[in-house]
Amino acid sequence: MAKAIMIQGTMSNAGKSLLAAGLCRIFKQDGYRVAPFKSQNMALNSFITEEGLEMGRAQVMQAEAAGIKPSVYMNPILLKPTNDTGSQVIVNGEVLGNMPAREYFAYKKNLIPDIMDAYHKLEEEYDIIVIEGAGSPAEINLKQDDIVNMGMAKMAKAPVLLVGDIDRGGVFAQLVGTVALLDEDERGMVKGLIINKFRGDKTILDPGIKMLEEKAGIPVVGVAPYLSIQVEDEDSLTERFGKDQEVNLIDIAVIRLPRISNFTDFNPFEMIEGVSLRYVKHVGELKHPDMIVLPGTKNTMEDLLWMRRNGLEAAILKEARAGCVVFGICGGFQMLGEQISDPQGVEAGGEIRGMGLLPMNTVFAGNKTRTRVSGRFQTMDGILGILSEVELEGYEIHMGKTSFRGEGQSLTRLSAHSGHLTEEKPDGAFLGNVYGTYVHGIFEKEQVAGKIVTALGEKKGLDLSGSAAVDFAAFKETQYDLLAAGLRENLDMDKIYEILEMGL
């Protein structure tokens, strides 16, 4: 049976996901079969497996680092917030339903058999399981029914490494305070402390480390540096949203919707020299980009109304009329149509007017489309005609069916794979300089992002055909290796292996 080690944090965004990925890579490099696991993930960034099941992208990233295929067993419960007080609950890759927070809190212990069944399946196949916690284990109002931090560590009999974020300040108080709020048996499960995101001269930190070990009674097993590693972020705490708004030769503006999902779709553009990828929340930030992207969202209707109220919709329509390329993905694609209807109350209920840029209507229904897809762009004219017949792949996750009328044409021809079923179908639409698709990950193939940048350059009289589009999958492999190298240099891996071997 597999040995386990668990990464918990003093807070959200302490770096648990990245450290777990780094350990997965190190264990893989050392010859072990290793898998990630997180019992419950709350995020709007999700992924569809080859079986047509949905899981959080953080565990997909960690599976890539481990060199294995993603499986829903790595993330048996996924919560996708629909508003400030409720979430869609996904169990073993399939939608269980929408629940208010209080209802889910009372229900979640019923999911322990699902969690442990998934964990045991991994346990039978791998040598090591790297478990990630969520938020902080010291949330004293939530501890009684915990299934993701110390509750999970107890069920898996996993020793814990507790991570604090020095970049936010107060790391000693974070770590000592968290340990102090744990129950006595839980404190005994914490076998090592990690200070994460350190910048500067470590010798200045050494006296504090000694005092930290004395006060907590737990050894510090490493001070991990602030690593500029470009891998996929888990949720809306991503630092990508806080980047400056400087405009480069080619400027791509992604609308930062309140319930934005799968923003990792656009990461490939960050790899291309001369391209600025900006996340825009206010009209004043929009400027005059070469392409505006409407991303996926967990609530299409509410986020469209948000754009309508704050003036972004009007600004986008003005840019579209001036010839700017507008590209919608999933919920952003639905917004581009003429009408969105929700007769069953899947989202907000009722119906609203769309942006009117594509001749189509969307009706929400209870069934969720979850498929992996491959295919190619249809023959197109216009600014992005360069994409004609270019191959693509990705996945669909959406509620709702979209029907077309009039002059719009299908954007892509897909082969959709859901479990053992394969279906040939058209997808998306384009009209003039407006494009939309349900396919997440559509920009990840090297040719797609590169050709879009080339076309946008040609429109401005720039020859960017020599700009190096990056093989995104290969690039991520280099980043996982850099992550592993950075952690090996700064963590006491001998001590971590000792903790792993001893267990609880």
Image (tube, grey):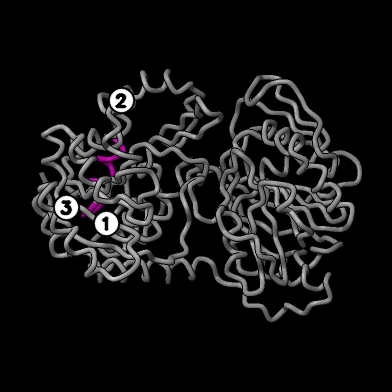
In space, the residues marked 2 and 1 are separated at their CA atoms by 25 Å
Residue 448 lies left or right of residue 95; in this view the side is right
Disc 1 on helix, strand or loop? strand
Amino acid type at image mark 1: Ile
Residue 21 lies left or right of residue 153; in this view the side is right
Task: Tell me what residue is drawn at x 25 percent, y 46 percent.
Answer: 173
Quadrant assignment for the C terminus: top left
Task: Tell me what residue is drawn at x 77 percent, y 79 percent.
Answer: 463
Residue 144 location, quadrant: top left
Q: Give the residue pinned by disc 1.
A: 195
Q: Give the residue pinned by disc 3.
A: 212
Residue 360 location, quadrant: top right
Q: In the rendered view, would you say 481 is above or below 283?
A: below
Segment colored magenta: 117-128
Q: Give the residue pinned by disc 2.
A: 141
Q: Position of residue 67 (x, y in %)?
A: 36, 61
Q: Residues within 10 Å of mark 1 (few under 14, many from 20)?
A: many
Q: Is residue 120 magenta?
A: yes
